[in-house]
Amino acid sequence: MTADELEWLRGLDFGPSRIPKLDALATVVPNGAEQDPAIVAAHKRSGFSRWFPVEGGHRVLFLYEGGEYDSSRFKVEPKAWDHETCKACRTHIPALTLCWVTQRGTYVVLCEACHNEVSTGHA
């Protein structure tokens, strides 16, 4: 991570967490339809998405924490949100693995190695 990123991360308050598998809204977005209003709205509502290439487009997951959704466009996939991604090194953090999340403000997730670097200055 850069010196600026390290300085920014050191200004945040982290606590330990083990994030469970969570439900996701799933759909397929054809190539060229990434700005479809339903897709944009789902991303805005969730704040998180994951895009997996498939033939002709992407299989897309949006973190789903309840509420109304267009069942003609999306389906709920129980526990499909099965990992987080470290903000610093981009490694996948499997569900229920110890990680570190901000206690308030901007949501940031760090793997244990990056949290160690942020908190102690050693990788």
Image (spheres, rainbow, N blue to C red):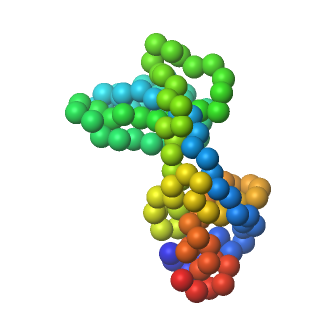
Horizontal placement of 64 versus 40: left or right? right
Identify the residue at image location x=51%, y=15%. Answer: 71
Horizontal placement of 28 versus 69: left or right? left
Q: Position of residue 73 (x, y in %)?
A: 45, 18
Which quadrant of the rendered structure holds the C terminus? Answer: bottom right
Horizontal placement of 3 versus 92: left or right? right
Viewer-side residue, 36 vs 89:
89
Identify the residue at image location x=68%, y=55%. Answer: 106
Residue 90 shows in the view: yes
Viewer-side residue, 93 vs 72:
93
Q: Position of residue 49 (x, y in %)?
A: 49, 41
Q: Quadrant of residue 26?
A: top left
Identify the residue at image location x=52%, y=25%. Answer: 76
Task: Establish if 121 lies above or below 26.
Answer: below
Q: Residue furthest top?
A: 72
Viewer-side residue, 12 vs 77:
77
Q: Position of residue 45 (x, y in %)?
A: 61, 32
Residue 44 shows in the view: no
Task: Establish if 90 lies above or below 30.
Answer: below
